[in-house]
Image (cartoon, rainbow, N blue to C red):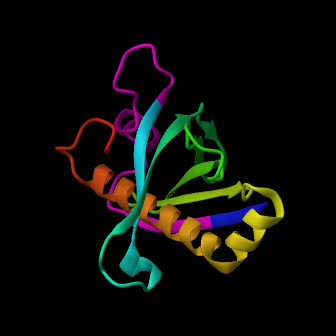
Amino acid sequence: MAHVFYEDEVACAPEGIVERLKARLAPQARGEADIWYELEVPFEDLHLPKIGRFSRKVLMHIGTPERRKYAMLLPISWRVEDSKAFPEFTGWIEAVPLSSTRTQLAILGDYTPPMGIVGSVIDAVGGHVVAQVTVRRFVERLRVLLEDAGVTGNGS
């Protein structure tokens, strides 16, 4: 099992941040529990030539928020629906109040590289870097969605 973590400061009041996150990550159709979301990693983030990006559409599940003394935790998980060659992620979006107008937003969680020993080798060689950048890019996208009052929908 591998661990990933990234945090960023958001110009957004802490009150109601979980509700705003859930609204921006809400399913498009009524009655659906999960959303389709495109996660992407530009090649240049991996120190490769700027000729493209890794991209994968995942099925994302947002759980029931948990209030802690210091933060709000929102369970999150995602998986690639049509392939067992990609790891499933399970973790939390953490929102920690910094002031009346700023919140620290973090994603922390775990994934198990697929394909046994072969997947573990791939993860050690470069897969973990892709996972870290994926989580960083996702937090950055959430920051933009939360700071842009005009944005609605699921952000995909």
Q: Find out whether residue 32 is within the magenta segment.
A: yes
User: Residue 6: which quarter of the image?
Assistant: bottom right
Q: Outermost residue, top direction?
A: 31
Return the x and y of residue 125 as percentages of the image width and height.
Answer: 67, 79
Q: What residue do we see at 40% from left, 60% from top?
A: 40
Residue 101 seen in render? no
Q: Is residue 70 left or right of residue 152?
A: right
Quadrant (top left/top right/bottom left/bottom right) for the N terminus: bottom right
Q: Which residues are magenta?
A: 5-34
Q: What residue do we see at 57% from left, 53% from top?
A: 94
Q: What residue do we see at 43% from left, 86% from top?
A: 47
User: Residue 124: which quarter of the image?
Assistant: bottom right
Q: Is residue 84 left or right of residue 23?
A: right
Reply above or below: 22 against 145: above
Task: Name the residue nearer the viewer: 146 or 5.
Answer: 5
Q: Outermost residue, left direction?
A: 150
Reply above or below: 66 against 40: above
Total label count? 0
Return the x and y of residue 100 as percentages of the image width and height.
Answer: 38, 56
Residue 4 seen in render? yes
Return the x and y of residue 3 as percentages of the image width and height.
Answer: 71, 64
Q: Outermost residue, right direction?
A: 117
Return the x and y of residue 146 as percentages of the image width and height.
Answer: 32, 50
Quadrant (top left/top right/bottom left/bottom right) for the C terminus: top left
Q: Find out whether residue 118 is within the magenta segment.
A: no
Q: Is residue 149 left or right of residue 125?
A: left
Task: Name the residue nearer the viewer: 61 or 88.
Answer: 88
Reply above or below: 127 against 145: below
Q: What residue do we see at 51% from left, 38% from top?
A: 60
